[in-house]
Image: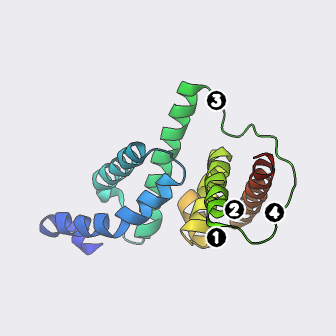
Amino acid sequence: MALFRQSRGREKAFGLVVRKFSRPLYCFIRRMVAGHHDTDDILQNTFIKAWDGLDKLKEDSALTSWIYRIATNETMSFLKEKARLAQVPLDDLDLADTETDGIRSEEETERINSLTMQAIRSLPKMQQVVFSMKHFDGLKYREISEILGTSEGALKASYHIAVEKIRLYVNKTAENI
């Protein structure tokens, strides 16, 4: 944090932040945004906002929470705008309960992975964010709570509902293929 306060070390310190967070943030954003170019645009906007907001970063703030909060806000803004333009809600799915079983071939595994990503994208935006942070990024509920400003209990409920919706979506869709 001290390097950010010094004008000479500011660019170097920010370069380290970009190198450290580029890949994890790209993966985080990409799980919610289908296109590579859109993901790159959101990531770039995230780092621009982070650079512009360095003076607002408090000494005691966790850098990870701060940068993920910016990425989350940028992603949510993009998704809202995209949904507004397309006028297609992401969360109007009717899901039923079925089960998958047995050993899967590589082709089946790829299909299930693809269906899983479709299911994640079909979740309400905040459930997408919570699920991605917890499942893919391995963040603890406490960390997600700091990033999103939501209680841990609400996050746990949101995550478990998201898991169930994903499971139901994948099972139902796989059954119909």
Please identify the residue farthest to the left as the structure is shown: 8
Residue 90 versus residue 2 in the image, above or below = above
How far from the left and from the top, in percent, is residue 95?
A: 82, 46
> Gap in Å between the C-alphas at discs 1 and 2?
7 Å
- The secondary structure type at the circle numbered 1 is helix
Comes first in the chain, label 3 or label 4: 3
Check residue 141 in the rendering and tell me which mark sits there, or answer none.
1
> Gap in Å between the C-alphas at discs 4 and 2?
27 Å
How far from the left and from the top, in percent, is residue 72?
A: 50, 52
Q: Nearer the viewer, mark 3 or mark 4?
A: 4
Comes first in the chain, label 4 or label 2: 4
Label 3 neighbour load within 10 Å: few <14, some 14-19, many 20+: few
Label 4 neighbour load within 10 Å: few <14, some 14-19, many 20+: few
Task: Say if mark 4 contacts mark 2, CB within 8 Å.
Answer: no
Task: Say if mark 1 contacts mark 2, CB within 8 Å.
Answer: yes
Which amino acid lies under the numbered mark 1 shown in the image of this protein?
Answer: Tyr
How far from the left and from the top, in percent, is residue 28?
A: 49, 59
Residue annotated with mark 2: 155
Q: Which quadrant of the figure contains the N terminus?
A: bottom left
Please identify the residue farthest to the right as the structure is shown: 97
Which amino acid lies under the numbered mark 3 shown in the image of this protein?
Answer: Val
Q: Identify the residue at horizontal 57%, vertical 57% (top origin).
A: 148
Comes first in the chain, label 1 or label 4: 4
Q: Nearer the viewer, mark 1 or mark 4?
A: 4
Q: Identify the residue at horizontal 26%, vertical 74% (top origin).
A: 2
> Gap in Å between the C-alphas at discs 2 and 3?
26 Å
Residue 135 versus residue 70 in the image, above or below = below
- The secondary structure type at the circle numbered 4 is loop
Residue annotated with mark 4: 100
- The secondary structure type at the circle numbered 2 is helix
Residue annotated with mark 3: 88
Check residue 89 in the rendering and tell me which mark sits there, or answer none.
none
